[in-house]
Structures are given as C-alpha cells and as structure tokens.
C-alpha cells in the first residue's frame, strides 16, 4: 500500500531512538563539513548522519523494520543500502546484515575520498557494529541458496533497468529461506506516467509494481493491489484525489509504495 501521512506511534518512537532519518541535530555552530570530517561528530550524531536522506525515509525505515519482524540472530541483506544508517541499526539489534550495493555513482564528486569498504570499516568502528559489504549487484553477491531470513530494499527498485530487476528478483527468491521475507519500498513519482505522459526522470521511472509482484513467484503478504501501478484496479485519478492521505515527499513529488513478499 502507499505509505500514509500519519505515522504510527511506534514509528515515531523508533525514529526518535535512532535519530532517523537525518541523524542527531547538532548545535548550529557545528558545520556540515565538520560532521563529515570528524569521527567524533558522526558518532554523536548517530548512524543516520553520514549518508544524506530523503524525508520519505521518515516512514520507510521504521516501516521496513517493523514489517520484517527481524530478530537478533537472523540474517539479512540491505539491497542498495549504501551508507544508510539502517543496516547499522540492524547490526546493533543483533542482526547479521550485509549491504549489497554496486556503488555505481560512487566517486570524488560524491565527496568520498576512500573506497566503500574503507568507509564501511570506519563506520563499523564508530558505531560498534559489524555490517558486511559486498560491492556488486545481488546476482553477483554469491549468497548460498536459502540462507537469508529477510532482504530489504528501500527505494532502490525504481532505479533498476528491467533486465537487472528481473535478475535481482530471481536471486531474491533463490537466496531467501522458505518463509523468508522480501521487504521493499518503491517510489511512485507524481511527475511521471501514469500521472503525466513523461516516462522517466533523473531518479528513475514508475515501475509496473503489480507485474513485478506477480512475476516474483512469491506470496504477497503486505500491499494493496489497488495502490500498485500496473494492477487493473489501480487508478491514477483516485491516487491524486486522495493525496492528503499519503506521505508526500517534500523535496520531490513522490509517494512511497510498500510491499512485503514471502517465499513459499
């Protein structure tokens, strides 16, 4: 279903506990450059302080956490997680978590002067965590079949070309345990088809989410087909007419579709 504007109390409490999604607000005299260059400042600001986030993560991160039912001792993958604070929170909760991300847009122009693995090592040291990293796509990550309890994907699918997405879905099903969950969010851009005639923007496209769910070969356990682009019952006009109900990104006209699939 599309994320609603009103957040449950448990989401608000989770965000407050972990200072999600932007990190702890430091005194105004501490400049952003100091935050980036100071290990002390990052440790104080928390795991969400390193990677910039969209405000839609205010609902996406706690939603993913609670819908997964993830527990200490379980194994998880954060697909395309980058240096988000989310996998570091999972690690602090006792989850064996691996981030799988090819870091395709990584480089000096993204203000990183070290390799992804070097940055990950520093962040693990700062936050006393053990988040593992695989710098590749999921099909290249070589996980053992039926070895994972949960795979998370927060606002990644809309960025993937169809061929990569098809490969990724096959791999998700292969490496999840029976009963394992694929917990994911997908951006729905209001400036693209089916709301306008435009096909794509700088961030991606509106994936035919209903088709994706059907082709996954997994059971839908959370999600409303009426609010999934591609379903016969989906109505762009109905979505637009009820925008006041939904969590709307403030930096860009985007809604968030939230889905959980289970391997059976």
Image (tube, rainbow, N blue to C red):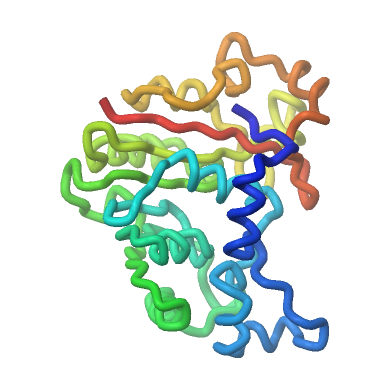
Q: Quadrant of the C terminus?
A: top left
Spot occupied by residue 254 in the image (x, y as percentages of width and height): 72, 40
Q: Which residue is drawn at the image coordinates 37% and 45% (left, top)? A: 151
Q: Is residue 258 above or below residue 211?
A: below
* Between 196 and 88, the one nearer to me in the picture: 88
* Between 139 and 30, the one nearer to me in the picture: 30
Q: Is residue 146 left or right of residue 65?
A: left
Which quadrant of the figure has residue 112?
A: bottom right
Q: Is residue 42 left or right of residue 79?
A: right
Q: Is residue 65 above or below residue 35?
A: above
Spot occupied by residue 1 in the image (x, y as percentages of width and height): 59, 27
Q: Which residue is drawn at the image coordinates 41% and 54% (left, top)? A: 78
Q: Is residue 173 above or below residue 55?
A: above
Spot occupied by residue 40 in the image (x, y as percentages of width and height): 58, 89
Which quadrant of the figure has residue 208?
A: top right
Determine the residue located farthest toward the top in the rendered image. Answer: 232
Q: Is residue 13 above or below residue 42?
A: above
Residue 230 seen anywhere in this rendered image of the structure = yes
Q: Which residue is drawn at the image coordinates 46% and 46% (left, top)? A: 153
Spot occupied by residue 99 in the image (x, y as percentages of width and height): 38, 60
Residue 203 seen anywhere in this rendered image of the structure = no
- Total number of numbered discs in the rendering: 0
* Between 34 and 171, the one nearer to me in the picture: 34
């Amino acid at each position: 279903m599309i994320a609603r504007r009103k957040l449950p109390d448990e989401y608000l409490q989770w965000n407050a506990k972990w200072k999600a999604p932007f990190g702890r607000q430091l005194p105004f005299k501490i400049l952003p450059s100091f935050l980036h260059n100071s290990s002390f400042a990052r440790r104080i600001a928390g795991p969400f302080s390193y990677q910039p986030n969209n405000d839609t993560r205010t609902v996406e991160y706690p939603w993913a956490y609670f819908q997964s039912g993830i527990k200490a001792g379980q194994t998880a993958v954060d697909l395309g997680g980058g240096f988000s604070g989310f996998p570091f929170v999972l690690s602090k909760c006792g989850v064996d978590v691996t981030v799988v991300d090819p870091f395709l847009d990584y480089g000096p122009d993204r203000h990183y002067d070290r390799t992804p693995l070097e940055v990950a090592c520093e962040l693990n040291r700062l936050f006393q965590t053990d988040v593992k990293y695989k710098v590749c796509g999921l099909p290249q990550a070589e996980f053992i079949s039926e070895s994972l309890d949960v795979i998370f994907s927060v606002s990644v699918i809309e960025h993937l070309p169809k061929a990569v997405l098809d490969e990724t879905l096959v791999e998700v099903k292969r490496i999840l345990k029976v009963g394992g969950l694929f917990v994911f969010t997908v951006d729905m851009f209001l400036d693209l088809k089916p709301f306008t005639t435009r096909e794509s923007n700088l961030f991606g496209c509106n994936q035919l989410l209903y088709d994706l769910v059907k082709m996954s070969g997994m059971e839908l356990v959370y999600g409303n087909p009426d609010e999934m682009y591609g379903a016969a019952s989906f109505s762009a006009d109905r979505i637009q007419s009820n925008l006041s109900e939904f969590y709307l990104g403030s930096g860009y006209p985007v809604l968030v579709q939230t889905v959980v699939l289970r391997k059976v």
